[in-house]
């Protein structure tokens, strides 16, 4: 079964740091673009950062300079290093990846989400 599993969320004080991981598992031929998204209570899901298979990264204005997205293609894992966290970063964080799962089969897959809470 092909799936994405996030980990690394938790409760942290303002100014603190967390590192999220997103691991892909199952029968996967290759992985294309990957990204992190988040959804706060009562708000729409929004893009946080994306990274291509050639490691080109893009960030939302709200996190640029504080968050760093990376990936390890050999481990089929993506990361999000979050520094200088603010209360407004509180949300459920989801990873998304374009997975090639067959010779002619590919699609976007989502993880189940991990909660990040920033509070004193």
Image (cartoon, rainbow, N blue to C red):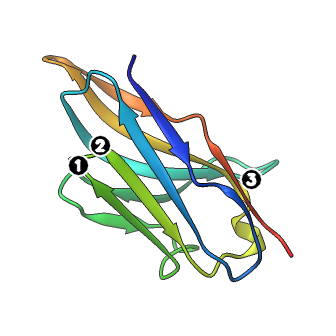
Quick check: 31 left or right of 66? left
Q: Are marks 3 and 1 in contact (CB under 8 Å)?
A: no
Marks 3 and 1, how far apart in space? 29 Å
Q: Is residue 100 shown above or below 44?
A: above
Quick check: 5 left or right of 104? right
Q: Are marks 1 and 2 in contact (CB under 8 Å)?
A: yes
Q: Is residue 39 shown above or below 87?
A: above
Q: Is residue 101 shown above or below 117?
A: above
> Are there few (<14), some (14-19), or many (20+) residues within 10 Å of tag 1?
some
x then y, percent, for residue 99: 29, 31
- Could you tell me which residue is drawn at 80 percent across and 49 percent down? 41
Marks 3 and 2, how far apart in space? 27 Å
Which corner quadrant of the image does residue 94 belong to? Answer: top right
- Could you tell me which residue is drawn at 37 percent across and 36 percent down? 24
Quick check: 84 left or right of 23? right
Q: Which residue is mark 3?
A: 40
Mark 1 residue element: loop
Marks 1 and 2, how far apart in space? 5 Å
> Are there few (<14), some (14-19), or many (20+) residues within 10 Å of tag 2?
some
Q: Nearer the viewer, residue 68 or 7?
A: 7
> Are there few (<14), some (14-19), or many (20+) residues within 10 Å of tag 3?
some
Mark 2 residue element: loop
Q: Residue 73 has which mark?
A: 1
Q: Which residue is mark 2?
A: 76
Q: Residue 38 has which mark?
A: none
Q: Nearer the viewer, residue 62 or 115?
A: 115
Closer to the eye: label 3 or 1 = 1
Closer to the eye: label 3 or 2 = 2
């Amino acid at each position: 079964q092909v799936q994405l599993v996030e980990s690394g969320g938790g409760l942290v004080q303002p100014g603190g740091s967390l590192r999220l991981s997103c691991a892909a598992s199952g029968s996967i031929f290759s992985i294309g673009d990957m990204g992190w998204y988040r959804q706060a209570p009562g708000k729409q899901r929004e893009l946080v950062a994306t990274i291509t298979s050639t490691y080109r990264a893009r960030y939302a204005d709200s996190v640029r300079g504080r968050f760093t997205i990376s990936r390890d293609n050999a481990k089929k894992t993506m990361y999000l290093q979050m520094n200088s966290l603010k209360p407004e970063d509180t949300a459920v964080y989801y990873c998304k990846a374009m997975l090639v799962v067959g010779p002619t089969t590919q699609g976007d897959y989502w993880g189940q989400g991990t909660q990040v809470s920033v509070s004193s």
